[in-house]
Amino acid sequence: MTEDSGNHLAKVRIKDLLLRAYIGIKEEEINNQQDVLINVCLTYDASEAVNRNEISAALNYRTITKQIIGHVDGNRFALLERLTHEVLSIVMGHEAVQWAEVEIDKPHALRYAESVSVCLQAHR
């Protein structure tokens, strides 16, 4: 294989991260944890990772995932919009991230619906 110095825009997806949090404004929601399903999609320039083939040159998505878990799991949020914004801020806190989209589902939030979700994006 030859070394390539070209731009390698990587798209990383963290799919179906299932956590539990206190989310909502009704008394039942405030007193009982509920499932939240988090999906993250981000892009970063992976040229160094491709060329060097070393973890130190790559965006560490395990670290990002651990930060999300630490922030969300077991914590309290009134609005799904706020929770989504806070998770997006964690992702964008990594300088290598050029663009990110976070979608968070609250399963069975509405009768007859599988889930309700909020999706937010940010870019540099």
Image (cartoon, grey):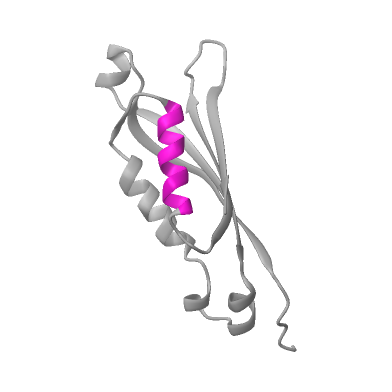
For the point 58% across and 81% down, the residue is: 53
Looking at this view, name the residue that lies furthest to the bottom: 2
Q: Position of residue 123 (x, y in %)?
A: 58, 50
Looking at this view, name the residue that lies furthest to the top: 111
- Along the line of sight, which residue is nearer the eye, 23 or 17? 23
- Where residue 119 sits, quadrant-wise, is top right
Picture layout, residue 29 above or below residue 80? above
Q: Position of residue 84 (x, y in %)?
A: 46, 36
Picture layout, residue 95 above or below residue 120? below
For the point 54% across and 27% down, the residue is: 117
Q: Is residue 27 left or right of residue 41?
A: left
Q: Position of residue 67 (x, y in %)?
A: 36, 53
Looking at this view, name the residue that lies furthest to the front: 124
For the point 37% across and 54% down, the residue is: 66
Q: Quadrant of the N terminus?
A: bottom right
Number of labels in the image equals 0
The residue range painted magenta reads: 80-92
- Along the line of sight, which residue is nearer the eye, 11 or 95? 95
- Along the line of sight, which residue is nearer the eye, 83 or 111? 83
Picture layout, residue 76 above or below residue 48? above
Q: Position of residue 36 (x, y in %)?
A: 43, 33
Q: Quadrant of the C terminus?
A: bottom right
Q: Is residue 58 left or right of residue 71?
A: right
- Where residue 30 sits, quadrant-wise, is top left
Q: Is residue 88 magenta?
A: yes
Q: Main secondary structure of the magenta part?
A: helix
Q: Is residue 86 left or right of residue 96?
A: left
Q: Is residue 46 magenta?
A: no
